[in-house]
């Protein structure tokens, strides 16, 4: 039986709102600074180089890095940003699009099993943040499978990963539970902590299941979780 790490439904650790905002900004900057830096490097090469081959290389670098920066910013806008007014809904098709653009590479494949519907924006944020946690479990690439069901007010989100060298960092479950081991959250851990905050805001229970050949992060509405446990 694969071990299941369950997350607490109520956080016992409070992070100052200004600190949370600063840490999330640091996370976003970390995600985009690398491709933006590569664009700057490419432009510098274009300024100094006359060799056609090197100039073509610089142009390819700029194009690839610009696409990467754009994909990351669009993803972060939905995963961390306001993405509309309070109470707004988001098309899950838009979430799928930004996720596919973010994970497009030769090592990772995204399988998206969800009907295209409007969902409350916090639930969409939760899906995308769960995708980030899942992606970190397959450092050498693999398959990320996202399944979303929403019926009669009960929502279930499953993000399943398979690949070589599977791993879930020890601090991630505690951070999602709102119980950081060191009673502190840094820029490296804020995304997992934020995922737990969103889950609780959506009245959803979140947990991780770890097996030898897969890792699954799942979230369910608390009422649905209680019904499943009673069966």
Image (cartoon, rainbow, N blue to C red):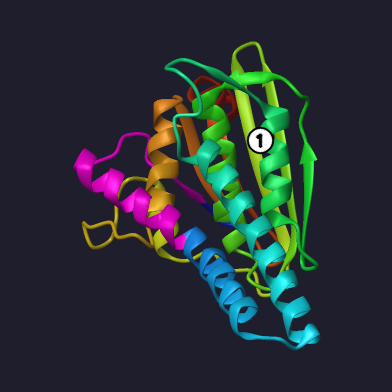
Answer above or below: position of 34 versus 70: below
Residue 201 vs 140, above or below: the answer is: above
Up the image or down, 176 lies above or below 53; here it is above
Q: Residue at x 44, y 53 (%)?
A: 28
Residue 67, located in which quarter of the rendered image? bottom right
Residue drawn at (21%, 42%) of the image: 18
| Residue 14 appears anywhere in the view | no
Q: Mark 1 points at which residue?
A: 95
Q: Which span is picked out in magenta?
A: 5-30
Front-most of 231 and 18?
A: 18
Q: Does the magenta stretch include residue 15?
A: yes
Question: Residue 37 in the image: x percent, y percent?
Answer: 51, 70
Q: Quadrant of the N terminus?
A: bottom right
Q: Viewer-proximal residue, 14 or 85?
A: 85
Which secondary structure, mark 1?
A: helix
- At 66% across and 75% down in the image, what residue appears? 165
């Amino acid at each position: 039986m694969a071990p299941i790490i369950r997350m607490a439904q109520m956080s016992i650790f409070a992070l100052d709102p200004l600190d949370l905002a600063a840490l999330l900004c640091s996370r976003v900057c970390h995600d985009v600074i690398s491709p933006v830096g590569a664009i700057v490097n490419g432009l510098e090469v274009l300024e100094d180089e006359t060799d056609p081959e090197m100039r073509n290389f610089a142009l390819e670098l700029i194009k690839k890095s610009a696409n990467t920066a754009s994909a990351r910013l669009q993803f972060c806008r939905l995963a961390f940003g306001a993405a509309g007014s309070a109470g707004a809904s988001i098309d899950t098709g838009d979430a799928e699009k930004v996720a596919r653009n973010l994970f497009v590479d030769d090592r990772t494949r995204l399988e998206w099993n969800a009907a295209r519907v409007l969902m409350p924006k916090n639930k969409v944020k939760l899906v995308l943040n769960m995708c980030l946690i899942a992606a970190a479990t397959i450092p050498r690439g693999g398959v990320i499978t996202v399944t979303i069901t929403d019926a009669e007010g009960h929502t279930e989100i499953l993000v399943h990963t398979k690949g070589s060298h599977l791993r879930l960092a020890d601090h991630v479950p505690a951070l999602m539970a709102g119980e950081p081991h060191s009673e502190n959250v840094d820029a490296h851990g804020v995304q997992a902590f934020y995922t737990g905050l969103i889950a609780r805001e959506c009245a959803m229970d979140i947990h991780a299941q770890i097996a030898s050949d897969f890792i699954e992060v799942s979230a369910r509405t608390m009422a649905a979780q209680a019904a499943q446990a009673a069966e």
